[in-house]
Image (cartoon, grey):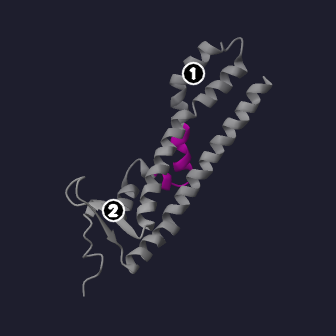
Amino acid sequence: MKSSASVCPVPAEQQPLNEFQDLQESWFFQWATQERWGYFQPIAILWLLSWVVVGPVAAVSFPISKFPLQFGLSGAMGACVMPLLALARLALGWKYVRDRLASETIFYEESGWYDGQTWTKPAEVLQRDRLIVTYQIQPILQRLTRTFIGFALFLVLGGGAWFLL
């Protein structure tokens, strides 16, 4: 007896399980699966690298000798853009795969954009995919959400501090 996965008409590169495995193996998307230090280190590096662009702009806007707090605050807040963009890309990629795994039907293209089809997952495939979503992808998305909340809190507090200066 053949398993239902073997009669799946969806091309291998478009199967949600394979898309999930590709994300896990991708150097960029793998970042979200790392332990605490491995996860926060690229965020810190991106934030520091952002200072290369943000620092001169902040220095022109707020000379360090006259306005050191404004310079530091505007630079720190501006440097958040690059890590936030990277985190948004991570979240969108993981959310896309989560939605494909959790969906009962899968849209796929056989040979091009003009011949899209849908495939309804058998119950055992759907159950397997939803377990992956629950135990592997949701924790990643929750971590990304908490990171976004941390950045939002920093930006709100920075904005509030700006008005006090």
At 70% from the left and 37% from the top, the residue drawn is 156
Specify the quadrant that holds the N terminus: bottom left
Q: Which three-letter amino acid code belongs to the residue tagged 2?
A: Phe
Q: Is residue 41 magenta?
A: yes
- The image shows residue 73 at horizontal and vertical percentages of 68, 26
Q: Residues within 10 Å of mark 1 (few under 14, many from 20)?
A: many
Judged left or right of residue 73, residue 96 is left
Closer to us: 63 or 102: 102
Q: Quadrant of residue 119?
A: bottom left
Per the image, the residue denoted by label 1 is 55
Q: Residue at x 50, y 39 (%)?
A: 85
Element marked by disc 2:
strand
As drawn, is 121 to the left or to the right of 42? left
Residue at the right extreme of this rendering: 164
Image position, residue 13 (x, y; %): 28, 59
Q: Which residues are the magenta region?
A: 31-44
Question: Looking at the image, which residue sits at the far left?
Answer: 111
**Residue 22 as seen in the image, left or right of residue 114:** right
Above/below status of 151 relative to 62:
below
Secondary structure mainly formed by the magenta segment: helix
Quarter of the image that includes the C terminus: top right
* Quadrant in the picture for residue 153: top right
Q: Please, what secondary structure does the residue beneath circle 1 have?
A: helix
Q: Residue 107, which numbered label?
A: 2
Q: Which residue is rendered at x = 65% and y = 41% of the image?
A: 152
On the rendered structure, is 30 left or right of 15?
Answer: right
Kind of residue at badge 1: Gly
